[in-house]
Amino acid sequence: MTAIATPEDHQLCIDIARGTGAVLLEQRQRCIDEGIEGKDMKNAGDAAAQAYIAAQLAEHRPDDAVLSEEATDDKARLTAERIWIIDPLDGTREFSEPPRSDWAVHIALVSNGVPIAGAVALPGDDLVLNTLEAPVLPPAVDGPPRVIVSRTRRPPAAVTLAKKLDAEYLEMGSAGAKAMAVVKGECDIYAHSGGQYEWDNCAPVAVALAAGLHCSRLDGSPMVYNNDDVYLPDLLICRPEWAERCLEILAEGIEEGVDEA
């Protein structure tokens, strides 16, 4: 049975995401001031964000289970009714390249495999998209769809869709930033193949669903969370008017190879 998120749960997602973003911005500036760069800046950000989130959940939801990219996986979560799935810093590479803003904080609450509350903070843009105040999807833009990819790699699923739909590419960093670009109407399709984990897309999917977007695996099956194996290799987040056509194209087969950006 799926638990129902309370308004306080939704608000807590927002508060933790926003607070973590503030911690990360402070940590980033501290690293800049002290000449800390690259991997050391990434590690500092991960550690600071994880410590803040762990403390907040311990204080406000001590009885709930937690799955975090930056913490040991406690398998007791598999029988828990409520599980927080978090990515304290999504996009460490982008975080470590000031002044880039295409990195995020993911906070989601899951029950029975379903995200029931969530927030994605984009601290560099002073923005927290969330399920309490569901984002309003902007009107569709005339012309070919826009497919979002990373700067350095275009996943085969995205390449296939772009070719078949004669789409334009938009490049951006972290998974959360890409997903929120669809929510904000900056692009139309985010298709990923090649590997992600539950924390990479749980909160983005929660927010995207609240905004009325289509969210599924590439084969059209639902996104299911809190699995024993947290590897979740593919997803499709897109505007509803493109969902049927995207799934048809993907069902025909993803072209081999990767189109390097």
Image: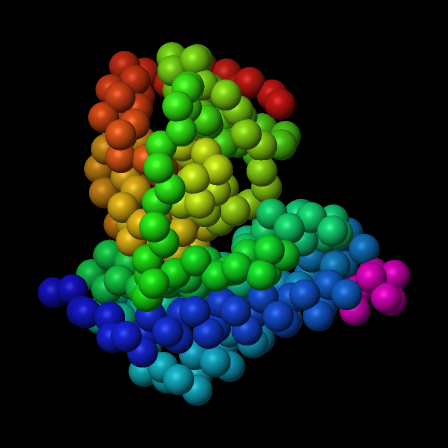
Kindly indicate the quadrant of the structure image that contains residue 119.
bottom left
Residue 154: image location, x then y, percent: 53, 26
Way the structure is coloured: rainbow
The residue that appears at 26% across and 30% down in the rendered structure is: 241
The answer to whether 128 is drawn above or below residue 223 in the figure is below
Quadrant where the N terminus sits is bottom left
Judged by its main secondary structure, the magenta piece is helix
Tell whether 89 sits left or right of 159. Answer: right
Viewer-proximal residue among 69 and 140: 140
Could you tell me which quadrant the C terminus lies in? top right
Q: Is residue 225 visible?
A: no
Nearest to the observer: residue 259 or residue 7: 7
The residue at 60%/21% (across/down) is 260
Q: Which of the 4 image quadrants contains residue 82?
A: bottom left
Q: Is residue 226 magenta?
A: no
Vertical placement of residue 116 versus 141, above or below? below
Whole-percent x and y of residue 57?
A: 43, 79
Is residue 139 at least partly visible in the picture? yes
The outermost residue toward the left is: 1
Which region shows up in magenta?
30-36
- Out of 96 and 198, give the one closest to the viewer: 96
The percent position of residue 132, horizontal first and vertical second, equals 32, 66
Q: Residue at x 58, y 28 (%)?
A: 153
